[in-house]
Image (cartoon, rainbow, N blue to C red):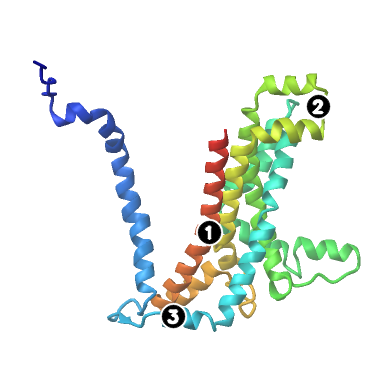
Amino acid sequence: MAQAAPTDQRSFWHRNRIAITPWLFLAPGLIMFMIYVILPIFQSMWISLHQWDGLSPKIFIGLDNYRELMTDDTFFVAIKNNIIWLVLYMLAVPIGLFISLLLNQTVMGIRIYKSLFFFPFVISQIVVGLVFTWVYDPSNGIFSIIFGWFGATCPAILGDERYVTYGIIAAGLWPQIAYCMILFLTGLNNVSPDQIEAGRLDNAKGWKMLWYVVLPQLRPATFIAIVVTVIGALRSFDLISIMTSGGPYGSSQVLAYYMYETALSEYGYRMGYGATIATVLFFIMMVYIAYFLRRMYVQEKEG
């Protein structure tokens, strides 16, 4: 006669503690993430379906805010400027890599040079904006002095609709290049000396060494640099606020600043319309983030 299998008499906690313990450690972070990130996202989507000034009762208007957005010229100017930001801001990645390769040397005084290049990253975006506002000053700025050397008149970069967005992006690149440089310097410290030596034995040097040996090992740093730069370009706000406030005539508007101006400034207090712009910006960012996360997942799966 077959004997019945012995039943596990231990408590539920003792039988499942290995599976439960990681979730207990993750729980505080997950709860905070749900409260401060996920919940506000859905609240913004819900508010975008209402007409609301932030004080009086909300009036449900369905998709009217989205229909109005499709006929809003300022919205499309902001979209165009965000695309320009996105394309030009990506220059921070190769320039940061180039500077990090130059600074990854063991020569006297290299720490001083690293500190000088690191400096833009530690100062506030507000300070960066003020510095470049003075640099672009057509009367007494550095640009006016340089143009004066050639007998030319310095253009009013921040007052000209053709140049203003590019002038602000140039200011934004200053700290962003420093940030990418730090990421690549960290990555270069982890490059395997064995693979470098193996590359030298295979007669790899210069561009071949960089392309086939160094850059593959910098893939994690490159991924983070690209993601952070893309997000930084799409959420650009501080520099526009301090340098032009979206002007002249709205020509330097981007989605983040237009959302603020519409929802929270004295020009609007249209919370529903501002939430609509925020929702559109969120989905644009999600496209990029989802693409890069999928790419990272595929690369890790391929080994």
Q: Residue 221: percent from the left, percent from the top? A: 60, 39
Left or right of residue 21, residue 189 in this image: right
Which numbered tag is attached to residue 65? 3
Residue placed at 37% from the left, 76% from the top? 49
Q: Nearer the viewer, mark 2 or mark 3?
A: 2
Which residue occupies 76% across, 70% down? 139
The image shows residue 288 at horizontal and vertical percentages of: 55, 56
Residue underneath mark 1:
287
Mark 3 vs mark 1: give the one in front.
1
Q: Residues within 10 Å of mark 2 (few under 14, many from 20)?
A: some
Q: Check disc 3 and give the amino acid type.
A: Asn
Q: Gap between marks 3 and 1, in whole Å?
A: 22 Å
* Residue for point 91% across, 68% down: 151
Which mark, residue 204? 2
Q: Is 179 or 35 nearer to us in this picture?
A: 35
Residue 223's x, y, as percent?
A: 59, 44
Residue 267 visible to an observer of this rendering:
no
Front in this rendered view, residue 292 or 30: 292
Question: Which residue extends farthest front?
Answer: 1
Q: Is residue 168 above or below residue 200?
A: below
Pointer 2 and pointer 1: residues touching (CB < 8 Å)? no
Type of amino acid under label 1: Val
Residue 297: percent from left, percent from top: 52, 42
Give the distance between the C-alpha atoms of the residues marked 2 and 3, in whole angstroms: 59 Å
Residue kind at label 2, given as amino acid type: Ala
In the image, is 217 to the left or to the right of 267?
A: right
